[in-house]
Amino acid sequence: MNRLVVIGNGMAGHRLVRALRDRDPAGSWRVDVLAEEPHPAYDRVALTSYVDDWDFDRLVLDPVDLASVHLGDPVRTIDRAAHTVTTASGAVYGYDALVLATGSYPFVPPIPGHDLPGCHVYRTIDDLDGIRAAAGRIGVGRRSALVVGGGLLGLEAAKALRDLGLSPHVVEMAPRLMPLQVDEGGGGLLRRLIAELDVTVHTGASTQAIAEERGRLLATLSNGTELDVDLVVFSAGVRPRDELARSTGLAVGERGGVVVDGGCRTSDPSVYAVGECACVDGRVYGLVAPGYAMAEVVADRLLGGSAAFPGADTSTKLKLLGVDVASFGDAHAATEGALEVVFHDAVAGSYKKVVVSDDARTLLGGVLVGDASAYPTLRALVGAEVPGDPAALIAPAGSGGAVGIAALPPSAQVCSCNAVTRGAIDEAIGAGCADVACVKKCTTAGTGCGSCLPALKQLLAVAGVAQSTALCEHFGQRRVDLFEILRATGIRTFSELIERHGTGRGCDICKPAVASMLASLGAGHVLDGEQAALQDTNDHFLANIQRNGTYSVVPRIPGGEITPAKLLVIAEVARDFGLYTKITGGQRIDLFGATVDQLPLIWRRLVDAGFESGHAYGKALRTVKSCVGTTWCRYGVQDSVGMAVELELRYRGLRSPHKVKAAVSGCARECAEARSKDFGVIATETGWNLYVGGNGGFTPRHAELLVSDVDSAMLVRLIDRFLMFYVRTADRLQRTAAWIEAMDGGIDRLREVIVDDSLGICAELEAAMELHVESYADEWSGVLEDPAKLARFRSFVNAPGVPDPTVSFREERGQRVPVSLGMPGGGR
Ligand SMILES: Cc1cc2nc3c(=O)[nH]c(=O)nc-3n(C[C@H](O)[C@H](O)[C@H](O)COP(=O)(O)OP(=O)(O)OC[C@H]3O[C@@H](n4cnc5c(N)ncnc54)[C@H](O)[C@@H]3O)c2cc1C
């Protein structure tokens, strides 16, 4: 049997072994994989997600039974004459064919201090464990970090550091972030969006030196800026690991990398190189897709084939700190005569550019920042004829001009990681694939970086296959089914739910959705145990993150009614913490500009004065607005304030699929604008009219009349049923308006269920609401009373009043506002 030795158990090495097994299940090669890292092969592309749960198993790639993998024992020498390699432990392996799959190492600029303790790189699981341990050792006070390099990996590192509770600075030598992928216009917007997320960006500057000072690191930038940080992560590019090739006399490229031909063969015919260590046509690729393509080529060659490396797509799409960035094809319009079409909506935070040939007929590439939903279609269209006006390619969705996925020709490559075309996907769908999971399995599309998954969904829809109602790829169930599972089984943790009823480890869709359901089911404080890790950013800190990375605080003011004494407390807190103060559209007072460390201090003052959280951060009941009603108004026919206060106190803290707003008007003049709310109550001479399903968010809707002239007790029971039915059966992020619209029979059906009790569930819905009312507890107090939860904020508590160097303010109309940015709108 032939002997194959693969040096390197990274993504390309692993792919090679898998490809060999797939093509040759009988196994005509005996394979030894020699690995430097002590861990099984893992998904390096998803490395940053390790910070979410520190669960390595989630990243492990499927083991391939064909190979013997030897972990933690790097190869030290290759003897090409003897056809052997020797590892650090002294083990010797003979080979008939040898594959170098040694990847890259992070480049660390040789600046003074680059090797001080506290300086890290960002490439492996061990690197992340090291960064985590270092972050854990940082004492109380302001915690910050420096990332050297503002490319793709630098921004990923910044995200990881932020998730570890550090405020990152990113220093990039080029005039913009991600200079390789993004053009000037996109870079400008990217910088703005990233800076809004507590990441301080320094472009056009390099790090000149790092020095140790009183246990911290002082970095000096070329523009004279000095940054006092706790740790430094170098992410200044990678270099191919070609040291073994050099020492054994194989040809290497001018700028490094093992030189290979189209068959991925090095200057020695029995030695191949794949992945980031290989140099094809003078080029080294730093992405996984080209490495996979090389691995396929070598597998084919080892079995006697003549496959050749087809060149590679260097398109990239990622969500950095929640900001979409994509770049594909000739993003910088380097092709002679190339024309650019740009659509930039600074208000919506979206930049889109397509590059077309000089006759405007062929799509060459593009850049998307802020909204990259068009990426799968556009990337697949690169090289194809533009179907119509190029501007239509980036026309806003819903404008009627946008080009959809249906325009892709069969030859268009939808998944660039695995080179899967639209034709192949259509074929799989034609053969019976009815969901994304099946398409993934049959075609391997979507199993790499995952950026084409939305395209797979769209192609299923184009082919007329009913859209899956699955919550996400980890749960095949609808939200309503998961709610029922939680209710029936009593499961109260995400990990148990996914283990018993889902797959994988979860994502940004299912984690907050399950967190919301658990909260509705009374699973305790939203920051209890593993629940904390499931929450969206706002819920994570029980406050709303704002454009400049500070938070806003909204105490509950039920019905908009407040005593002068409480008003004074709010005024004093705002004054003492220098908070911008605004009356919201929902009749309460929003205090903007608080840093994370200030939140518990502010809550303490407010809670002591009798305030509680207004849940302005949560998908929960926000406000019940009111007019003054019979108490003061000459026209009022009922006590609208009293009713609003009662309803707001009853439903406060109720977690729901989307935020819920309500209002009570004391007469038909409707001063509280109740019909624009999720539920609105309007007083009549004999009782109350109840309207439901208003608001609608992006698509404004008036609420529709559900019942008229009911008394107060009945009104409350009906709202109990309405809200509980909504919480249980609506989809994730579905507003009440859309929920009723989607209901077969609309408002009439809703009336049958919650007024006429056609399903016999009203008593149960009321009982569930009663349970919510009884178990309600203020979330701010929950943190203040629990040292474990408080620890989340404690690292900052020792430094109250210390100005945050990453946040700057200016004065506007007598108040502090963030520099150069207006405050976001939206009623709270
Ligand atoms: C944080 C991060 C995010 C990324 N995001 C993306 C992305 O979004 N899209 C994308 O396309 N790419 C991304 N990449 C790049 C992608 O991970 C690499 O392109 C891919 O891992 C390259 O595969 P490889 O096998 O060539 O190298 P690697 O995966 O690095 O594997 C090489 C292996 O060889 C081992 N090795 C080296 N020398 C020896 C020796 N002498 N003996 C034994 N073993 C040895 C190394 O320890 C390593 O385990 C990202 C990388 C990182 C770090």
Image: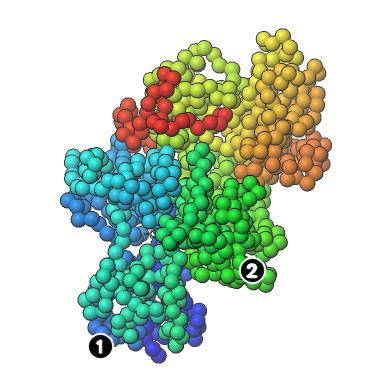
Q: What is the spatial separation of the Cα atoms under label 2 and label 1, in whole angstroms? A: 50 Å
Left or right of 404 on screen, residue 41 = left
Res 214 quadrant in image: top left
- Comparing 278 with 719, the one in front is 278
Q: Secondary structure at mark 1?
A: loop
Q: Quadrant of the C terminus?
A: top right
Evaluate whether residue 399 shows in this view: yes
Give the residue at mark 2: 426
Residue 714: % across, % down:
76, 27
Q: Quadrant of the N terminus?
A: bottom left
Evaluate whether residue 190 shows in this view: no
Ligand 1 positioned in quadrant: bottom left
Q: Is mark 2 within 8 Å of ligand 1?
A: no
Query: Which amino acid is tagged 2?
Result: Asp
Residue 577: % across, % down:
38, 23
Name the front one of labels 2 and 1.
2
Say if 555 sits above or below 327 in the image.
above
User: Which residue lies at the image location 42% right of the left edge and 84% below the top edge?
Assistant: 302
Q: How has the structure been colored for display? A: rainbow
- Comparing 701 with 35, the one in front is 701
Say if 95 sits above or below 456 in the image.
below
For the residue carrying disc 1, how many other residues have a C-alpha within 10 Å: few (<14), some (14-19), or many (20+)?
few
User: Which residue lies at the image location 66% right of the left edge and 18% below the top edge?
Assistant: 627
* Chain-order first, disc 2 or disc 1: 1
User: Which residue lies at the image location 79% right of the left edge and 37% below the top edge?
Assistant: 751
- Comparing 586 with 598, the one in front is 586
User: Which residue lies at the image location 43% right of the left edge and 54% below the top edge?
Assistant: 49
Res. 82 mark: 1
Say if 176 sits above or below 363 in the image.
above
